[in-house]
Amino acid sequence: MNFRVSYLTATLLIAILLGACSSTPTQQVSPTETIANQSEDAATEARFNQNLNQLITQAAQNQGIPQTSLELGFSDAKTIPSIRKLVLPPSGTFKKNWVAYRKRFIEPVRLKAGKVFWEQNQAFLSKVEQESGVPAEVIVSIIGIETIYGRQTGNFRVKDVLSTLAFSYPNTPNKISREQLFKDQLQELILMCWTEGGGSLPANNSKQGLNQSRFNACLNQNSSYAGAIGLPQFMPSSIRSFAVDGDGDGHIDLKQSPKDAIASVANFMKKHGWQPSMPIYFPVQEAAISEARALADGEPQLKYSVQELIAKGLLTKEQGDLQVGGVDPQSKTLIVDLPYPDKDGNNQVRYIVGLNNFLTIVQYNRSYFYAQSVAEFAEALGYKNQSVVPAHTTKAKSEVKSSESVKAKPKKTASKKKQK
């Protein structure tokens, strides 16, 4: 696949010649600086091509995919400089702002679109909720926050995005680990697209040309600047592991099929430990803010039981009672901090208690801001954020307690029950 380097060099020379003929005024740059910039760009592109060639060769050897098909699919792959800027960490003066983040996503346009999306897919959402245990409001809120129900799915070719971030990631402290992550995603994309293109067919099958076309189309589909695809913004690895055929047409299409997107989001949440009929978070009691501050360590791990937090004053007794919308007292939690600057620029923090379902949302997008936005978007759509214990279960438990009380005490004192 070395022909890509020659083609690139020729293109670069033509661009330079055309640029020299342009009559458009340009900023004066010294000859030395021009040569240095061209040299750096050429070196970057050369490394990009070499590394991409190596990955393609490895994929062909390890997965049994014809190398010619891979070369054809990636023949026009390119780096996208703007993406390298988009993944840079914020500057040192940047302040996290929960209030601004929330305002961006929980706003009238998305909420209105969410209600329309729900109405259009109400029957299927109800079906998926019953089967998966994931509330319809949560599914709708995730798709709304991710893409406004398909309005904003990205406009970069996914193969360019993942190739750029795999082989030309900006110089950041986590450059090595991030490049490896995107190399893995690029390989997942190849496998996903090969399967989608009918890659299981023999190489000499008469439909091979059609397969190549479908393979290329899959590689060229639009994604976000991080390589996420479709209404729910799944990365290639998530598509291969968690996406499902919701509409039953034998094909998973997260870009055009709302049912596929709905079913896939629910499946992701279920596979990552969503607890049906349980809340997502609890607010921290105002009197215990200082205690919450001491326990908030930023680690996405369930550490403290609800009973412990009740004892420390962060939660109320009712929040440790399933019968009134709480959870089991032994349920594990984490303390979540949501910082923001006030109108005077002073640092403020809102604290909440995240439950198991909060951490499940974090697995979808590793951000406390994101998870809390999903929860509050869902609440704006009608989600109650409390445990839902079936009435017959409550009645059965009550009858068992009553029966045990009768057996344990003399008949004349059976009606004297301990008040909660």
Image (spheres, rainbow, N blue to C red):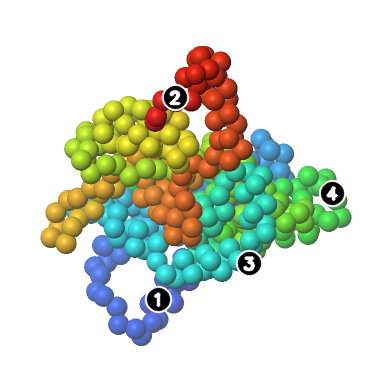
For mark 4, give the secondary structure: loop
Label 2, secondary structure: give it.
Answer: loop
Q: Which residue is mark 3?
A: 120
Quickly name the residue at label 4.
Answer: 204
Instruction: Please identify, in this view, whether the residue under mark 3 or under mark 1 is nearer the observer.
Output: 3
Residue of label 1: 19
- Relative placement, left or right, of 137 versus 37 is right
* C-alpha span from label 2 to label 1: 94 Å
Mark 4 crowd level (few <14, some 14–19, many ≥20, 10 Å Cα) = few
Where is 199 relative to 303, above or below? below
Q: Amino acid at mark 2?
A: Lys
Between discs 3 and 2, the one toward the N terminus = 3
CA gap, disc 2 and disc 4? 83 Å
Q: Earlier in the sequence, mark 3 or mark 1?
A: 1
Can the viewer see residue 211?
no
**Secondary structure of residue under mark 1:** helix
> What residue sits 67% from the left and 57% below the top?
124
In this view, the residue in front, 113 or 74, is 113
Q: Tell which tag, 3 or 4, sits nearer the viewer.
A: 3
In this view, the residue in front, 420 or 322, is 420
Q: Does label 3 or label 4 sit earlier along the sequence?
A: 3
Residue 389, horizontal then vertical, whole percent? 54, 39
Give the Cα separation between the discs numbered 3 and 2: 53 Å
Residues at circles 2 and 1 in contact by the CB criterion of under 8 Å: no
Amino acid type, residue under disc 3 in the picture: Gln
